Amino acid sequence: MSALVNGPAWHGRPNGVASASVVGVAIESEGIAKRFGQVQALKGVDLQVREATVYGLLGPNGAGKTTMVRILTTLLSPDQGHARVVGYDVVRDAEALRHRIGLAGQAAAIDGNLTGFENLEMVGRLYHLPASEAERRAQQVLERFELTDAADRVARTYSGGMRRRLDLGASLVGRPEVLFLDEPTTGLDPRSRLALWDVIRELVKDGTTLLLTTQYLEEADVLADRIAVIDRGSVIAEGTPDELKRQTGGEILYIRVADRSRTPEAAGAVVGIVEGGQKVDNNTGELTLPVGDRGTAILTEAVRRLDDAKIELADIGLRRPTLDEVFLLITGREAEAEEETR
Amino acid sequence: MSAQARRAASAPGVGERIRWAIHDGLVLTRRNLRRYIRIPTLLVFSTIQPVMFVLLFRYVFGGAITQLPPGADSYVNYLMPGIFVQTAIFGSTQTGIGLAEDLNGGIIDRFRSLPAARSAVLAGRTTADLVRNLMVVLIMTTVGYLVGFRFQEGLGFAILGIALAVTVGFAFSWISATIGLAIKNIESVQAASFVWIFPLTFASSAFVPAESFPGWLRAWSNVNPVTIWSDTLRGFTLGTEYVTFVGETMTSLAVKSALWVGAILAVFVPLSIRLYRRT
Protein backbone atom coordinates (compact mmCIF):
# COMPACT_ATOMS: atom_id res chain seq x y z
CA MET A 1 0.00 0.00 0.00
CA SER A 2 2.65 2.51 0.99
CA ALA A 3 5.34 1.55 -1.47
CA LEU A 4 5.07 5.00 -2.95
CA VAL A 5 6.36 6.82 0.07
CA ASN A 6 9.02 4.38 1.19
CA GLY A 7 11.39 4.83 -1.69
CA PRO A 8 14.44 6.95 -0.97
CA ALA A 9 13.75 9.02 -4.07
CA TRP A 10 10.40 10.26 -2.85
CA HIS A 11 11.51 13.84 -3.26
CA GLY A 12 14.33 13.63 -5.68
CA ARG A 13 15.75 16.61 -3.84
CA PRO A 14 19.50 17.06 -3.99
CA ASN A 15 21.20 16.67 -0.62
CA GLY A 16 22.29 19.75 1.20
CA VAL A 17 20.13 22.15 -0.75
CA ALA A 18 18.26 24.64 1.36
CA SER A 19 14.70 24.58 0.22
CA ALA A 20 14.00 28.26 0.67
CA SER A 21 15.65 31.52 1.53
CA VAL A 22 14.52 30.83 5.08
CA VAL A 23 15.53 27.31 5.99
CA GLY A 24 12.57 25.08 6.66
CA VAL A 25 10.03 27.27 4.91
CA ALA A 26 8.36 25.64 1.92
CA ILE A 27 5.98 28.39 0.88
CA GLU A 28 6.17 32.09 1.54
CA SER A 29 4.16 34.86 0.02
CA GLU A 30 4.16 38.59 0.53
CA GLY A 31 1.38 40.95 -0.39
CA ILE A 32 -0.10 38.80 -3.16
CA ALA A 33 -2.86 40.73 -4.93
CA LYS A 34 -4.93 39.74 -7.93
CA ARG A 35 -7.84 41.44 -9.66
CA PHE A 36 -10.23 40.01 -12.23
CA GLY A 37 -12.01 42.91 -13.90
CA GLN A 38 -14.10 44.53 -11.18
CA VAL A 39 -13.40 41.85 -8.60
CA GLN A 40 -10.40 42.18 -6.30
CA ALA A 41 -9.92 38.46 -5.70
CA LEU A 42 -6.87 38.82 -3.43
CA LYS A 43 -5.94 41.90 -1.44
CA GLY A 44 -2.40 41.32 -0.24
CA VAL A 45 -2.00 37.81 1.13
CA ASP A 46 1.00 36.91 3.27
CA LEU A 47 1.59 33.25 3.99
CA GLN A 48 4.38 31.23 5.49
CA VAL A 49 4.25 27.47 5.43
CA ARG A 50 6.88 25.32 7.09
CA GLU A 51 8.29 22.25 5.40
CA ALA A 52 6.59 18.93 6.02
CA THR A 53 3.48 20.46 7.49
CA VAL A 54 -0.10 20.73 6.38
CA TYR A 55 -1.39 24.22 5.87
CA GLY A 56 -5.10 24.82 5.53
CA LEU A 57 -6.59 27.70 3.59
CA LEU A 58 -10.05 27.94 5.00
CA GLY A 59 -12.84 30.06 3.65
CA PRO A 60 -16.15 30.15 1.82
CA ASN A 61 -16.50 29.92 -1.95
CA GLY A 62 -15.25 33.05 -3.64
CA ALA A 63 -12.93 33.94 -0.76
CA GLY A 64 -9.89 33.74 -3.02
CA LYS A 65 -8.55 30.31 -2.04
CA THR A 66 -8.43 28.93 -5.55
CA THR A 67 -6.87 32.11 -6.93
CA MET A 68 -4.12 31.83 -4.30
CA VAL A 69 -3.48 28.18 -5.23
CA ARG A 70 -3.38 29.04 -8.93
CA ILE A 71 -0.78 31.74 -8.26
CA LEU A 72 1.37 29.45 -6.09
CA THR A 73 1.24 26.72 -8.76
CA THR A 74 2.31 29.15 -11.54
CA LEU A 75 -1.03 29.03 -13.37
CA LEU A 76 -1.67 32.73 -12.73
CA SER A 77 0.63 35.70 -12.26
CA PRO A 78 -0.08 37.95 -9.31
CA ASP A 79 -0.72 41.66 -10.00
CA GLN A 80 1.32 42.55 -6.94
CA GLY A 81 3.48 40.82 -4.39
CA HIS A 82 5.92 37.92 -4.44
CA ALA A 83 5.75 34.27 -3.63
CA ARG A 84 8.37 31.58 -3.38
CA VAL A 85 7.79 27.85 -3.22
CA VAL A 86 10.76 25.71 -2.15
CA GLY A 87 12.95 28.70 -2.93
CA TYR A 88 11.65 29.27 -6.46
CA ASP A 89 9.90 32.47 -7.41
CA VAL A 90 6.48 31.52 -8.77
CA VAL A 91 6.81 33.96 -11.68
CA ARG A 92 10.53 34.08 -12.58
CA ASP A 93 11.34 30.45 -11.85
CA ALA A 94 7.98 29.01 -12.85
CA GLU A 95 9.42 26.41 -15.15
CA ALA A 96 11.86 24.94 -12.65
CA LEU A 97 9.24 25.08 -9.92
CA ARG A 98 6.80 22.94 -11.88
CA HIS A 99 9.16 19.97 -11.48
CA ARG A 100 8.72 20.17 -7.72
CA ILE A 101 5.03 20.69 -7.17
CA GLY A 102 1.86 18.71 -7.65
CA LEU A 103 -1.64 20.09 -8.05
CA ALA A 104 -5.06 18.58 -7.83
CA GLY A 105 -7.62 21.22 -8.69
CA GLN A 106 -11.32 21.32 -7.99
CA ALA A 107 -12.39 19.66 -11.22
CA ALA A 108 -11.10 16.13 -11.70
CA ALA A 109 -8.45 16.84 -14.35
CA ILE A 110 -8.32 13.43 -15.98
CA ASP A 111 -8.98 12.23 -19.51
CA GLY A 112 -12.10 10.08 -19.59
CA ASN A 113 -10.98 8.39 -22.81
CA LEU A 114 -7.75 7.09 -21.32
CA THR A 115 -7.54 4.23 -18.85
CA GLY A 116 -6.54 4.98 -15.28
CA PHE A 117 -3.07 3.63 -16.01
CA GLU A 118 -2.68 5.68 -19.20
CA ASN A 119 -3.74 8.86 -17.40
CA LEU A 120 -1.05 8.42 -14.76
CA GLU A 121 1.62 7.26 -17.20
CA MET A 122 0.95 10.36 -19.35
CA VAL A 123 1.42 12.65 -16.35
CA GLY A 124 4.67 10.84 -15.54
CA ARG A 125 5.93 11.39 -19.08
CA LEU A 126 5.02 15.07 -18.86
CA TYR A 127 7.14 15.26 -15.69
CA HIS A 128 9.90 14.04 -18.05
CA LEU A 129 10.33 10.68 -16.36
CA PRO A 130 11.74 7.85 -18.47
CA ALA A 131 9.02 5.57 -19.85
CA SER A 132 9.78 2.66 -17.51
CA GLU A 133 9.77 4.92 -14.45
CA ALA A 134 6.51 6.60 -15.52
CA GLU A 135 4.92 3.16 -15.83
CA ARG A 136 6.28 2.00 -12.48
CA ARG A 137 4.96 5.04 -10.67
CA ALA A 138 1.60 4.78 -12.38
CA GLN A 139 1.29 1.24 -11.01
CA GLN A 140 2.30 2.38 -7.53
CA VAL A 141 -0.22 5.19 -7.48
CA LEU A 142 -2.99 2.88 -8.72
CA GLU A 143 -2.14 0.49 -5.90
CA ARG A 144 -2.07 3.17 -3.29
CA PHE A 145 -5.46 4.52 -4.27
CA GLU A 146 -6.95 1.03 -4.66
CA LEU A 147 -7.53 1.44 -8.36
CA THR A 148 -5.46 -1.51 -9.58
CA ASP A 149 -8.56 -3.50 -10.56
CA ALA A 150 -9.78 -0.59 -12.66
CA ALA A 151 -6.35 0.25 -14.10
CA ASP A 152 -7.22 -0.81 -17.64
CA ARG A 153 -10.71 0.60 -17.76
CA VAL A 154 -11.27 3.96 -19.44
CA ALA A 155 -11.72 6.61 -16.77
CA ARG A 156 -15.13 7.75 -18.00
CA THR A 157 -16.54 4.49 -16.62
CA TYR A 158 -15.24 5.34 -13.14
CA SER A 159 -17.50 6.44 -10.30
CA GLY A 160 -17.15 9.99 -8.99
CA GLY A 161 -15.04 8.84 -6.06
CA MET A 162 -12.74 6.81 -8.28
CA ARG A 163 -12.22 9.75 -10.64
CA ARG A 164 -11.36 11.95 -7.70
CA ARG A 165 -8.86 9.39 -6.40
CA LEU A 166 -7.28 9.04 -9.82
CA ASP A 167 -6.99 12.82 -10.03
CA LEU A 168 -5.28 13.01 -6.65
CA GLY A 169 -3.06 10.13 -7.67
CA ALA A 170 -2.01 12.05 -10.76
CA SER A 171 -0.80 14.91 -8.56
CA LEU A 172 1.53 12.47 -6.77
CA VAL A 173 3.13 10.88 -9.83
CA GLY A 174 5.88 13.52 -9.90
CA ARG A 175 6.62 12.94 -6.19
CA PRO A 176 6.26 16.63 -5.46
CA GLU A 177 7.96 18.37 -2.58
CA VAL A 178 4.94 20.59 -2.21
CA LEU A 179 1.47 19.35 -2.97
CA PHE A 180 -1.46 21.68 -3.55
CA LEU A 181 -4.90 20.24 -3.10
CA ASP A 182 -7.82 22.50 -3.92
CA GLU A 183 -10.83 21.20 -2.00
CA PRO A 184 -9.57 17.62 -2.21
CA THR A 185 -12.47 15.89 -0.50
CA THR A 186 -15.31 17.73 -2.20
CA GLY A 187 -17.57 15.08 -3.68
CA LEU A 188 -15.94 12.16 -1.85
CA ASP A 189 -17.95 9.72 0.20
CA PRO A 190 -17.03 9.55 3.91
CA ARG A 191 -14.97 6.38 3.50
CA SER A 192 -12.90 7.84 0.65
CA ARG A 193 -12.47 11.03 2.61
CA LEU A 194 -11.01 9.19 5.57
CA ALA A 195 -8.75 7.20 3.23
CA LEU A 196 -7.51 10.44 1.70
CA TRP A 197 -6.80 11.90 5.12
CA ASP A 198 -4.62 8.86 5.83
CA VAL A 199 -2.71 9.40 2.60
CA ILE A 200 -2.17 13.04 3.47
CA ARG A 201 -0.81 12.18 6.92
CA GLU A 202 1.52 9.60 5.41
CA LEU A 203 2.85 12.06 2.84
CA VAL A 204 3.56 14.68 5.45
CA LYS A 205 5.29 12.16 7.68
CA ASP A 206 7.66 11.53 4.79
CA GLY A 207 8.48 15.18 4.34
CA THR A 208 5.97 16.48 1.81
CA THR A 209 4.57 19.91 2.44
CA LEU A 210 0.90 20.23 1.76
CA LEU A 211 -1.30 23.20 1.19
CA LEU A 212 -4.97 22.40 1.02
CA THR A 213 -8.00 24.56 0.66
CA THR A 214 -11.24 23.57 2.21
CA GLN A 215 -14.66 24.83 3.10
CA TYR A 216 -14.95 22.11 5.71
CA LEU A 217 -13.81 23.45 9.02
CA GLU A 218 -13.70 19.96 10.42
CA GLU A 219 -11.22 18.95 7.74
CA ALA A 220 -8.89 21.85 8.47
CA ASP A 221 -9.20 21.12 12.17
CA VAL A 222 -8.28 17.45 11.76
CA LEU A 223 -5.53 17.78 9.16
CA ALA A 224 -3.88 21.16 9.28
CA ASP A 225 -0.96 22.12 11.47
CA ARG A 226 -1.76 25.74 10.78
CA ILE A 227 -4.76 27.44 9.26
CA ALA A 228 -5.28 30.74 7.53
CA VAL A 229 -8.87 31.88 7.49
CA ILE A 230 -9.37 33.72 4.24
CA ASP A 231 -12.36 35.89 3.51
CA ARG A 232 -12.99 38.24 0.59
CA GLY A 233 -9.39 38.12 -0.54
CA SER A 234 -7.71 38.71 2.81
CA VAL A 235 -6.33 36.53 5.57
CA ILE A 236 -8.42 37.47 8.58
CA ALA A 237 -6.94 35.04 11.08
CA GLU A 238 -3.96 32.71 11.19
CA GLY A 239 -2.62 30.14 13.61
CA THR A 240 -2.87 26.57 14.82
CA PRO A 241 -6.40 25.24 15.16
CA ASP A 242 -6.09 25.52 18.94
CA GLU A 243 -4.80 29.08 18.77
CA LEU A 244 -7.66 30.07 16.54
CA LYS A 245 -10.16 28.58 18.91
CA ARG A 246 -8.56 30.27 21.89
CA GLN A 247 -8.04 33.57 20.07
CA THR A 248 -11.73 33.85 19.49
CA GLY A 249 -13.29 33.98 22.86
CA GLY A 250 -12.52 31.03 25.07
CA GLU A 251 -15.29 28.60 25.81
CA ILE A 252 -18.81 28.07 24.63
CA LEU A 253 -21.79 27.27 26.81
CA TYR A 254 -23.88 24.63 25.11
CA ILE A 255 -27.51 23.98 26.07
CA ARG A 256 -29.96 21.48 24.61
CA VAL A 257 -33.61 21.75 25.63
CA ALA A 258 -35.49 18.48 26.23
CA ASP A 259 -38.75 19.76 24.71
CA ARG A 260 -37.77 21.45 21.48
CA SER A 261 -40.97 23.51 21.33
CA ARG A 262 -39.78 25.39 24.42
CA THR A 263 -36.53 26.52 22.79
CA PRO A 264 -37.65 30.17 22.37
CA GLU A 265 -38.65 30.24 26.05
CA ALA A 266 -35.23 28.96 27.03
CA ALA A 267 -33.58 31.55 24.82
CA GLY A 268 -35.65 34.23 26.56
CA ALA A 269 -34.62 32.95 29.98
CA VAL A 270 -30.89 33.17 29.34
CA VAL A 271 -30.96 36.38 27.33
CA GLY A 272 -28.63 39.04 28.70
CA ILE A 273 -26.24 36.68 30.47
CA VAL A 274 -23.65 37.33 27.77
CA GLU A 275 -23.26 40.27 25.42
CA GLY A 276 -24.15 39.03 21.95
CA GLY A 277 -23.00 35.98 20.05
CA GLN A 278 -25.89 33.93 21.33
CA LYS A 279 -27.17 31.37 18.83
CA VAL A 280 -30.48 29.58 18.91
CA ASP A 281 -31.59 26.67 16.75
CA ASN A 282 -35.31 26.00 17.18
CA ASN A 283 -35.15 22.83 15.09
CA THR A 284 -32.66 21.03 17.29
CA GLY A 285 -33.43 22.81 20.57
CA GLU A 286 -29.80 23.91 20.86
CA LEU A 287 -28.46 27.17 22.24
CA THR A 288 -24.84 28.30 22.32
CA LEU A 289 -23.36 31.27 24.17
CA PRO A 290 -19.76 32.43 23.99
CA VAL A 291 -18.68 32.78 27.61
CA GLY A 292 -15.05 33.86 27.42
CA ASP A 293 -13.26 32.88 30.64
CA ARG A 294 -16.32 33.23 32.87
CA GLY A 295 -17.56 29.76 31.97
CA THR A 296 -18.35 28.39 35.43
CA ALA A 297 -20.17 31.49 36.68
CA ILE A 298 -22.28 31.75 33.57
CA LEU A 299 -23.05 28.03 33.59
CA THR A 300 -24.35 28.31 37.17
CA GLU A 301 -26.42 31.37 36.32
CA ALA A 302 -27.92 29.69 33.23
CA VAL A 303 -28.86 26.55 35.13
CA ARG A 304 -30.54 28.67 37.86
CA ARG A 305 -32.55 30.72 35.35
CA LEU A 306 -33.68 27.72 33.31
CA ASP A 307 -34.65 25.90 36.49
CA ASP A 308 -36.71 28.93 37.60
CA ALA A 309 -38.45 28.84 34.22
CA LYS A 310 -39.05 25.08 34.72
CA ILE A 311 -37.44 24.23 31.39
CA GLU A 312 -36.15 20.68 31.32
CA LEU A 313 -32.70 20.22 29.75
CA ALA A 314 -31.34 17.29 27.75
CA ASP A 315 -27.77 18.54 28.00
CA ILE A 316 -25.73 21.49 29.21
CA GLY A 317 -22.01 22.05 29.39
CA LEU A 318 -18.91 24.03 28.49
CA ARG A 319 -16.78 23.24 25.46
CA ARG A 320 -14.22 24.69 23.07
CA PRO A 321 -15.70 26.42 20.03
CA THR A 322 -15.73 24.58 16.72
CA LEU A 323 -14.07 26.24 13.79
CA ASP A 324 -17.55 27.01 12.44
CA GLU A 325 -18.15 29.16 15.48
CA VAL A 326 -14.68 30.66 15.17
CA PHE A 327 -15.45 31.64 11.60
CA LEU A 328 -18.71 33.20 12.69
CA LEU A 329 -16.98 35.16 15.41
CA ILE A 330 -14.21 36.43 13.12
CA THR A 331 -16.27 37.31 10.10
CA GLY A 332 -19.60 38.05 11.73
CA ARG A 333 -21.13 35.73 9.15
CA GLU A 334 -21.82 32.06 8.82
CA ALA A 335 -19.19 30.18 6.84
CA GLU A 336 -21.41 29.99 3.81
CA ALA A 337 -20.78 30.24 0.14
CA GLU A 338 -20.69 33.60 -1.48
CA GLU A 339 -20.97 33.88 -5.20
CA GLU A 340 -17.98 32.25 -6.82
CA THR A 341 -15.69 34.76 -8.46
CA ARG A 342 -12.94 32.53 -9.67
CA MET B 1 23.91 26.41 -3.34
CA SER B 2 21.87 29.57 -3.63
CA ALA B 3 18.52 29.70 -5.35
CA GLN B 4 20.20 31.71 -8.10
CA ALA B 5 22.77 29.03 -8.73
CA ARG B 6 20.14 26.30 -8.70
CA ARG B 7 18.18 28.23 -11.26
CA ALA B 8 21.19 28.57 -13.50
CA ALA B 9 22.02 24.89 -13.09
CA SER B 10 18.50 23.78 -13.93
CA ALA B 11 17.96 26.10 -16.89
CA PRO B 12 18.00 23.86 -19.95
CA GLY B 13 19.74 24.82 -23.20
CA VAL B 14 17.94 25.51 -26.45
CA GLY B 15 18.63 22.07 -27.89
CA GLU B 16 17.28 20.33 -24.84
CA ARG B 17 14.24 22.59 -24.78
CA ILE B 18 13.38 21.69 -28.35
CA ARG B 19 13.90 18.01 -27.63
CA TRP B 20 11.50 18.15 -24.66
CA ALA B 21 9.01 20.26 -26.60
CA ILE B 22 8.86 17.53 -29.27
CA HIS B 23 8.70 14.82 -26.61
CA ASP B 24 5.84 16.54 -24.76
CA GLY B 25 4.01 17.29 -28.00
CA LEU B 26 4.19 13.61 -28.95
CA VAL B 27 2.99 12.48 -25.50
CA LEU B 28 -0.12 14.62 -25.98
CA THR B 29 -0.50 13.58 -29.64
CA ARG B 30 -0.67 10.00 -28.44
CA ARG B 31 -3.21 10.99 -25.80
CA ASN B 32 -5.42 12.73 -28.37
CA LEU B 33 -5.20 9.84 -30.85
CA ARG B 34 -6.21 7.34 -28.18
CA ARG B 35 -9.57 9.07 -28.15
CA TYR B 36 -10.19 7.78 -31.68
CA ILE B 37 -9.23 4.26 -30.67
CA ARG B 38 -11.54 4.40 -27.65
CA ILE B 39 -14.42 5.98 -29.56
CA PRO B 40 -14.09 4.51 -33.08
CA THR B 41 -17.47 6.00 -34.01
CA LEU B 42 -15.79 9.44 -33.98
CA LEU B 43 -13.69 8.46 -36.98
CA VAL B 44 -16.64 6.74 -38.62
CA PHE B 45 -18.81 9.83 -38.31
CA SER B 46 -16.13 12.21 -39.47
CA THR B 47 -15.90 10.03 -42.59
CA ILE B 48 -19.62 9.67 -43.25
CA GLN B 49 -20.10 13.37 -44.05
CA PRO B 50 -17.40 13.60 -46.75
CA VAL B 51 -18.53 10.26 -48.19
CA MET B 52 -22.02 11.72 -48.49
CA PHE B 53 -20.59 14.74 -50.25
CA VAL B 54 -18.83 12.46 -52.74
CA LEU B 55 -22.02 10.49 -53.44
CA LEU B 56 -24.12 13.66 -53.58
CA PHE B 57 -21.89 15.43 -56.08
CA ARG B 58 -20.91 12.34 -58.04
CA TYR B 59 -24.42 10.98 -58.56
CA VAL B 60 -26.95 13.77 -57.80
CA PHE B 61 -25.30 16.88 -59.28
CA GLY B 62 -22.61 15.18 -61.35
CA GLY B 63 -24.87 14.09 -64.17
CA ALA B 64 -25.93 17.68 -64.84
CA ILE B 65 -22.37 18.98 -64.94
CA THR B 66 -21.36 18.51 -68.55
CA GLN B 67 -18.98 21.41 -69.13
CA LEU B 68 -15.73 19.97 -67.90
CA PRO B 69 -12.42 21.79 -68.24
CA PRO B 70 -9.73 20.25 -70.41
CA GLY B 71 -7.77 17.50 -68.69
CA ALA B 72 -10.78 16.30 -66.71
CA ASP B 73 -12.17 13.34 -68.60
CA SER B 74 -14.92 12.75 -66.04
CA TYR B 75 -16.63 14.79 -63.33
CA VAL B 76 -15.46 12.49 -60.55
CA ASN B 77 -11.86 13.12 -61.55
CA TYR B 78 -12.57 16.86 -61.35
CA LEU B 79 -14.46 16.53 -58.07
CA MET B 80 -12.21 14.41 -55.85
CA PRO B 81 -9.31 16.89 -55.47
CA GLY B 82 -11.84 19.48 -54.26
CA ILE B 83 -13.34 16.92 -51.89
CA PHE B 84 -9.90 16.18 -50.43
CA VAL B 85 -9.36 19.87 -49.65
CA GLN B 86 -12.89 20.28 -48.27
CA THR B 87 -12.59 17.14 -46.12
CA ALA B 88 -9.33 18.34 -44.60
CA ILE B 89 -10.78 21.79 -43.84
CA PHE B 90 -13.99 20.39 -42.33
CA GLY B 91 -11.93 17.92 -40.29
CA SER B 92 -9.83 20.72 -38.83
CA THR B 93 -12.86 22.12 -36.96
CA GLN B 94 -12.33 19.25 -34.50
CA THR B 95 -9.20 20.97 -33.21
CA GLY B 96 -11.11 23.87 -31.69
CA ILE B 97 -13.82 21.61 -30.33
CA GLY B 98 -11.26 19.32 -28.70
CA LEU B 99 -9.45 22.27 -27.10
CA ALA B 100 -12.71 23.74 -25.80
CA GLU B 101 -13.55 20.34 -24.27
CA ASP B 102 -10.18 20.19 -22.55
CA LEU B 103 -10.52 23.73 -21.22
CA ASN B 104 -13.94 23.01 -19.78
CA GLY B 105 -12.82 19.70 -18.28
CA GLY B 106 -9.99 21.27 -16.25
CA ILE B 107 -7.29 19.01 -17.70
CA ILE B 108 -5.50 22.00 -19.28
CA ASP B 109 -4.82 23.31 -15.76
CA ARG B 110 -3.13 20.04 -14.94
CA PHE B 111 -0.97 20.20 -18.07
CA ARG B 112 -0.01 23.78 -17.28
CA SER B 113 1.02 22.91 -13.72
CA LEU B 114 3.36 20.20 -15.05
CA PRO B 115 6.89 20.89 -16.28
CA ALA B 116 5.77 20.02 -19.83
CA ALA B 117 6.61 22.45 -22.64
CA ARG B 118 4.06 25.26 -22.99
CA SER B 119 3.62 24.43 -26.65
CA ALA B 120 2.69 20.78 -26.01
CA VAL B 121 -1.08 21.18 -25.65
CA LEU B 122 -1.50 22.98 -28.99
CA ALA B 123 1.17 20.99 -30.82
CA GLY B 124 -0.22 17.68 -29.54
CA ARG B 125 -3.74 18.61 -30.56
CA THR B 126 -2.92 19.86 -34.07
CA THR B 127 -0.55 16.94 -34.75
CA ALA B 128 -3.15 14.40 -33.66
CA ASP B 129 -5.71 16.09 -35.90
CA LEU B 130 -3.22 15.96 -38.75
CA VAL B 131 -2.91 12.20 -38.31
CA ARG B 132 -6.69 11.86 -38.10
CA ASN B 133 -7.11 14.00 -41.24
CA LEU B 134 -4.62 11.78 -43.06
CA MET B 135 -6.68 8.72 -42.12
CA VAL B 136 -9.88 10.36 -43.36
CA VAL B 137 -8.29 11.52 -46.63
CA LEU B 138 -6.97 7.98 -47.24
CA ILE B 139 -10.44 6.59 -46.62
CA MET B 140 -11.80 9.21 -49.04
CA THR B 141 -9.26 8.09 -51.63
CA THR B 142 -10.58 4.56 -51.32
CA VAL B 143 -14.16 5.81 -51.65
CA GLY B 144 -13.09 7.86 -54.68
CA TYR B 145 -11.57 4.80 -56.32
CA LEU B 146 -14.81 2.89 -55.72
CA VAL B 147 -16.82 5.54 -57.62
CA GLY B 148 -14.39 5.82 -60.54
CA PHE B 149 -11.77 8.35 -59.48
CA ARG B 150 -8.16 7.74 -60.50
CA PHE B 151 -4.87 9.54 -59.83
CA GLN B 152 -3.68 10.00 -63.40
CA GLU B 153 -0.19 11.35 -62.88
CA GLY B 154 1.37 8.48 -60.99
CA LEU B 155 2.18 7.65 -57.37
CA GLY B 156 4.54 10.58 -56.75
CA PHE B 157 1.87 13.15 -57.57
CA ALA B 158 -0.74 11.14 -55.68
CA ILE B 159 1.39 11.39 -52.54
CA LEU B 160 1.98 15.11 -53.17
CA GLY B 161 -1.76 15.64 -53.52
CA ILE B 162 -2.63 13.88 -50.29
CA ALA B 163 0.20 15.71 -48.54
CA LEU B 164 -1.20 19.03 -49.76
CA ALA B 165 -4.71 18.27 -48.48
CA VAL B 166 -3.38 17.23 -45.07
CA THR B 167 -1.12 20.31 -44.87
CA VAL B 168 -4.07 22.57 -45.62
CA GLY B 169 -6.00 20.79 -42.85
CA PHE B 170 -3.08 21.36 -40.47
CA ALA B 171 -3.08 25.11 -41.22
CA PHE B 172 -6.83 25.27 -40.63
CA SER B 173 -6.38 23.40 -37.35
CA TRP B 174 -4.59 26.48 -36.05
CA ILE B 175 -7.46 28.74 -37.13
CA SER B 176 -9.79 26.33 -35.40
CA ALA B 177 -7.56 26.32 -32.30
CA THR B 178 -7.74 30.11 -32.18
CA ILE B 179 -11.53 30.02 -32.39
CA GLY B 180 -11.75 27.28 -29.77
CA LEU B 181 -9.52 29.17 -27.32
CA ALA B 182 -11.36 32.45 -27.93
CA ILE B 183 -14.91 31.11 -27.59
CA LYS B 184 -14.33 28.16 -25.21
CA ASN B 185 -17.94 26.95 -25.41
CA ILE B 186 -18.11 23.66 -27.32
CA GLU B 187 -21.46 24.19 -29.08
CA SER B 188 -20.59 27.76 -30.03
CA VAL B 189 -17.23 26.67 -31.44
CA GLN B 190 -19.03 24.10 -33.55
CA ALA B 191 -21.56 26.63 -34.85
CA ALA B 192 -18.98 29.37 -35.36
CA SER B 193 -16.78 27.14 -37.50
CA PHE B 194 -19.40 26.49 -40.16
CA VAL B 195 -20.29 30.17 -40.54
CA TRP B 196 -17.03 30.81 -42.36
CA ILE B 197 -16.15 27.35 -43.61
CA PHE B 198 -19.21 26.99 -45.82
CA PRO B 199 -18.74 30.13 -47.95
CA LEU B 200 -15.01 29.46 -48.07
CA THR B 201 -15.28 25.91 -49.39
CA PHE B 202 -18.40 26.15 -51.55
CA ALA B 203 -17.71 29.53 -53.18
CA SER B 204 -14.65 28.07 -54.84
CA SER B 205 -13.78 25.79 -57.69
CA ALA B 206 -13.69 22.84 -55.28
CA PHE B 207 -16.89 21.20 -56.57
CA VAL B 208 -17.72 22.83 -59.90
CA PRO B 209 -15.72 24.87 -62.41
CA ALA B 210 -15.98 28.59 -61.66
CA GLU B 211 -16.83 29.45 -65.30
CA SER B 212 -20.56 29.25 -64.60
CA PHE B 213 -20.40 31.62 -61.57
CA PRO B 214 -21.73 35.21 -61.83
CA GLY B 215 -18.95 37.80 -62.10
CA TRP B 216 -18.82 38.81 -58.40
CA LEU B 217 -18.72 35.21 -57.21
CA ARG B 218 -16.09 34.37 -59.74
CA ALA B 219 -13.97 37.27 -58.54
CA TRP B 220 -14.17 35.90 -55.00
CA SER B 221 -13.56 32.33 -56.12
CA ASN B 222 -10.43 33.37 -58.01
CA VAL B 223 -8.81 34.82 -54.87
CA ASN B 224 -10.19 32.15 -52.57
CA PRO B 225 -7.31 29.97 -51.36
CA VAL B 226 -9.59 26.92 -51.51
CA THR B 227 -9.70 27.43 -55.30
CA ILE B 228 -5.93 27.65 -55.43
CA TRP B 229 -5.44 24.51 -53.33
CA SER B 230 -8.10 22.60 -55.29
CA ASP B 231 -6.52 23.64 -58.60
CA THR B 232 -3.07 22.68 -57.38
CA LEU B 233 -4.32 19.28 -56.28
CA ARG B 234 -6.04 18.93 -59.66
CA GLY B 235 -2.75 19.72 -61.29
CA PHE B 236 -1.31 16.77 -59.35
CA THR B 237 -4.13 14.45 -60.45
CA LEU B 238 -5.14 15.74 -63.91
CA GLY B 239 -1.86 17.03 -65.29
CA THR B 240 -0.59 20.15 -67.02
CA GLU B 241 -3.46 20.50 -69.47
CA TYR B 242 -5.77 21.55 -66.66
CA VAL B 243 -3.14 23.81 -65.09
CA THR B 244 -2.64 25.66 -68.38
CA PHE B 245 -6.41 26.03 -68.75
CA VAL B 246 -6.70 27.91 -65.43
CA GLY B 247 -3.88 30.18 -66.58
CA GLU B 248 -1.17 28.93 -64.26
CA THR B 249 1.87 26.71 -64.27
CA MET B 250 2.48 23.83 -61.89
CA THR B 251 5.15 25.90 -60.16
CA SER B 252 3.06 29.05 -59.79
CA LEU B 253 0.18 27.04 -58.26
CA ALA B 254 2.47 25.19 -55.89
CA VAL B 255 4.09 28.44 -54.76
CA LYS B 256 0.72 30.15 -54.22
CA SER B 257 -0.56 27.15 -52.28
CA ALA B 258 2.50 27.13 -50.06
CA LEU B 259 2.29 30.89 -49.50
CA TRP B 260 -1.35 30.63 -48.39
CA VAL B 261 -0.55 27.81 -45.97
CA GLY B 262 2.44 29.78 -44.70
CA ALA B 263 0.38 32.94 -44.26
CA ILE B 264 -2.32 31.15 -42.27
CA LEU B 265 0.29 29.52 -40.03
CA ALA B 266 2.15 32.82 -39.60
CA VAL B 267 -0.99 34.52 -38.34
CA PHE B 268 -2.80 31.82 -36.39
CA VAL B 269 0.05 29.93 -34.71
CA PRO B 270 1.19 32.98 -32.71
CA LEU B 271 -2.41 34.11 -32.19
CA SER B 272 -3.53 30.79 -30.73
CA ILE B 273 -0.40 30.55 -28.58
CA ARG B 274 -1.15 34.00 -27.18
CA LEU B 275 -4.73 33.04 -26.42
CA TYR B 276 -3.57 29.79 -24.83
CA ARG B 277 -1.16 31.62 -22.55
CA ARG B 278 -3.95 33.89 -21.39
CA THR B 279 -6.45 31.17 -20.52
Image: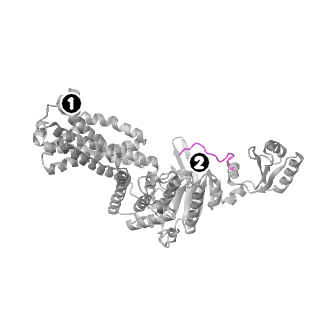
Count of number-bearing discs: 2
Give the residue at the far top of this rendering.
B214
Residue B118 lies within the magenta run: no
Residue A331 lies within the magenta run: yes
* Quadrant of residue A191 within the rendered picture: bottom right
Assign the magenta stretch its main secondary structure: loop
**CA separation in Å, label 1 and label 2:** 59 Å
Chain for disc number 2 = A
Q: Nearer the viewer, mark 1 or mark 2?
A: 1
Q: Could you tell me residue B204's position as x and y percent? A: 23, 35
Q: Determine which of the numbered discs, if any, sits on residue B218 in the image.
A: 1
Residue A288 in view in this figure: yes
| Three-letter amino acid code at the position of disc 2 | Ala
Give the residue at the far right of this rendering.
A308
User: What residue sits right under mark 2 in the picture?
Assistant: A63
Q: Could you tell me residue B88's position as x and y percent? A: 27, 44
Report crowding for label 2: few under 14, some 14 to 19, many 20 or more residues within 10 A (C-alpha).
many
Q: Are marks 1 and 2 on the same chain?
A: no
Q: Could you tell me residue A145's position as x and y percent? A: 51, 62
Closest to the observer, B9 or B44: B44
Under circle 2, the secondary element is loop
Closest to the observer, A184 or B113: A184
Magenta extent:
A330-342
